[in-house]
Amino acid sequence: MRTRFPALPPSAIALLLQIAAFALVLLSVRLFELQPEPLTFALACGLLAASFSQLAGQARWWFVIQLLFAPALVLMLNADIPPSVFLAAFLIMLAVYWSTFRTQVPLYLSSNKVWRALEGLLPLQQPDSHFRFIDLGSGLGGVLTHLARLRPDGHYCGVESAPLPLLMSWLRTKPYPNCEVHWASIWDEKLAACNLAQYDVVFAYLSPVPMERLWHKARAEMRPGAVFISSTFTIPGLEPDQHIAVDDLHQSTLLVWRM
Ligand SMILES: C[S@@+](CC[C@H](N)C(=O)[O-])C[C@H]1O[C@@H](n2cnc3c(N)ncnc32)[C@H](O)[C@@H]1O
């Protein structure tokens, strides 16, 4: 189902619906002169917000988030946890997920089996010949370091927007002189590394949200003969040249387009 508020990110819609639910429950409590327990009040807010989410056409998982948000707040406040714990948890989440609320691409990692399947999509090894590979949204750098170790004839580049994954991938790729990672958005036109014209293989494991825009970028920038690989997420309305099913926990598929 498509959301009825496409201009806003889902998290902003969810917050607005929580506020609307809270206002309605508060109004009813005042109107009918009720005196509910805080948890009952929160449950009513949760139920209403979850129903609003359904009506607004939000993705299924928002129903559960909306339902549990206010009751979880009340339970947490009752648990008497020091505020510093919440601040620390918030800062860690911020460093890991950064702008996920806007990009709608969270951190989750490719499996070792995907890394191995990617080996078979690299250009053939030839004497005195090098190729260039980029991982768009390179997470913890697992794809880059695995391939750099196995195929030292390649140059590997990662672009990552979230600071903590970037730091981890920077430490991880340090021993590999043929690896580099950049703290940037993949859409950054000022960063030379983001120009896809220089790569033989472009890899992305993102989410359904940016795929159409990414395909326009790939078509505009990539050279003929270069390979564009998306793990799991397809480009709407565009059949890939090759599907590679990977027998991992998520039943990943590599979708391959040759330019
Ligand atoms: C699903 S993870 C994939 C990680 C890694 N490529 C892998 O296969 O294991 C997607 C990553 O892309 C990053 N990301 C999302 N949007 C981005 C953007 N616009 N620019 C740079 N990185 C982005 C996220 O922070 C996340 O680390």
Image (cartoon, helix red, strand yellow):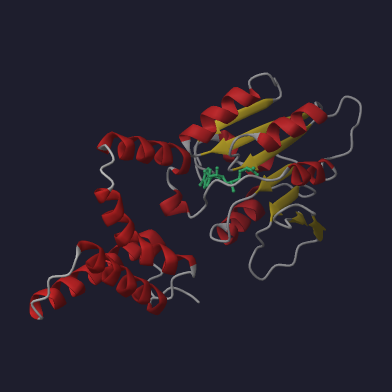
Residue 234 is situated, as x and y percent measured from the top left of the image, at: 67, 62
Q: Is residue 9 visible?
A: no
Q: Is residue 69 left or right of residue 236?
A: left
Residue 259 is situated, as x and y percent measured from the top left of the image, at: 76, 54
Q: Is residue 5 above or below residue 140?
A: below
Q: Is residue 74 above or below residue 115?
A: below
Residue 3 is situated, as x and y percent measured from the top left of the image, at: 43, 73
Front residue of 216 and 118:
118
Q: Is residue 68 left or right of residue 168?
A: left
Q: Is residue 68 left or right of residue 198?
A: left
Q: Quadrant of residue 90?
A: top left
Front residue of 211 and 41:
41
Residue 73 is situated, as x and y percent measured from the top left of the image, at: 29, 54
Q: Quadrant of residue 94?
A: top left
Q: Is residue 201 left or right of residue 103?
A: right
Front residue of 156 and 78:
78
Q: Residue furthest right?
A: 127
Q: What residue appears at the point 42 percent right and 41 percent down from the top-left corner?
A: 93
Q: Is residue 62 above or below residue 180?
A: below
Q: Quadrant of ligand 1?
A: top right
Q: What residue appears at the point 41 percent right and 36 percent down from the top-left corner?
A: 92
